[in-house]
Image (spheres, rainbow, N blue to C red):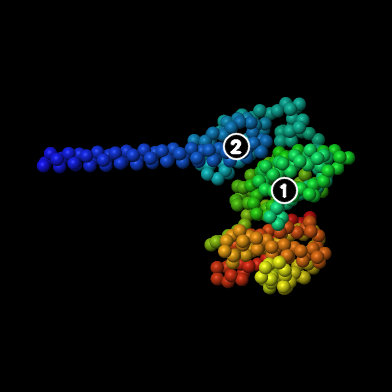
Amino acid sequence: MTEIAHKKQSSFLLLILLVIFVVAGLTTLAVIIKKDVIENDLSQRTNRLLIISHLFDGKVIFEGRDAFVEGSVTTKENKNKVLDIVKNIDGVREVTEHIDIKPVSINAADNDITTNKKVEKPLPLAGRFTLRYDAGQWILVGETDSELTKQNLIDSTREVIGEDINASLLTVNPNKPRPRWVNLYLHVLESFSLVHGGAELTLNKGILTIGGDVDSETAMRMTLLPFREAFGDIVSIRNNLRIPVFKNGLYIPNKKHPIENIDLTQLEFNDENTALISNSGLETLVNELKNNSRLYIEIGGNFNLADDEEKNIQISLQRALLVKKYLIENGIAKARLRTMGFGSSRPLDTDDETRNQRIDVTVIREE
């Protein structure tokens, strides 16, 4: 009996050891897999941003969350910019660098606006183009030299943004040379994909305005950097990007302009959200827009009473479009208005639901 008990005890101990080894092995495997996932994610995000920055010839290798940057740049300033990009990637812990500074030759610098070669400042880009998100759709507006250029712009935009593109306002004028902004736009568009929410990229009268929502200061810097590198010597860059502010899950509007404080809480819509039954506050909004013709605004709908978020977004957008329609019918240019449906993503109050069923007005730029 004692021998049997001893054998059972030995078997039990072996079983425990086997379980421990299996658990340890699975844990180690999980750690390795997670490490690979982290390294792959950081590598993709970092190298993607470095590619579109046009500053760096080299690569970034990750060991866990630690980055090793190896390659060359043309100036010390560009070296600092490259390191700033890597250090500000969310998730990066330590950065080690081996970056050589190799100034380019005079001939190689002819078309490189990021080098230290002194070149005559070119004339500002002429014409106008806009990439705008409005009523659930990306809209591309501008003038190109050929159908091929037009299709290039549409395909490139669609590939990066990943949405249907309305290009009905992108016209062709074969009597004009290919706009210089086209080539630059194709190089920097990828960084614009970091922007979410209401977005707008506009070149007009030598000013490139970049607007929309980003989720962090890092995303803002990473969005602006490629545009500043590509366009900075030939246009002025206007940063209209914003980071929506939340506290305890509630949205805090950034109402800097008087027009954003107009009371629209008494607006009423019919049950189908196909018509306004009370336009209280909209007459004041029309007058303010007429008195301030340089203001461009976003009309943001908010709604959270539907069964699912897709329906909330649809209803909030329908209401925003009705407000836009009213403004246009009362003499406000369509180009000055952008509409967004935020659904239930921007609540103001946990107790008073009426405050969450509202229209917000936000100034997106001032020309």
Name the residue rendered at 81%, 66% in the picture: 330
Q: How far apart are the alpha carbons under marks 1 and 2?
A: 27 Å
Mark sitting on residue 47:
2
Looking at the rendered image, the quarter that the N terminus falls into is top left
Task: Give residue 165's mark.
Answer: 1
The structure residue drawn at horizontal position 80% and vertical position 49%, both measured from the top left corner, is 169
What is the three-letter code of the residue carrying label 1? Answer: Ile
Horizontal arrangement in the rendering, residue 37 relative to residue 153 (left or right): left
| First of labels 1, 2 by sequence position | 2
- Label 1, secondary structure: give it: strand
Is residue 276 rendered to the left or right of residue 126? left
In this orientation, does residue 257 appear? no
> Dot 1: within a 10 Å radius of its alpha carbon, few (fewer than 14), some, or many (20 or more) residues?
some
* Position in image of residue 329 (x %, y %): 80, 65
Q: Quadrant of residue 353?
A: bottom right
Q: Could you say where residue 351 lies in the image, as x and y percent from the top left? A: 55, 71
Query: Outermost residue toward the right?
Result: 175
Among the 4 quarters of the image, the one containing residue 303 = bottom right
Say which element carries label 2.
helix
Q: In the rendered image, which quarter is residue 366 located in?
A: bottom right
User: Furthest residue to the front?
Assistant: 272
Categorize mark 2 by other alpha carbons within 10 Å: few (<14), some (14-19), many (20+): some
Residue 59, relative to residue 276: is it above or below? above
In this rendering, the answer to whether 223 lies above or below 278 is above
Q: Give the x, y percent position of residue 313.
A: 63, 60
The tag on residue 236 is: none
Residue at 66% x, 35% y is: 55
Kindly identify the residue that appears in the image at 62 percent across and 69 percent down. Answer: 355
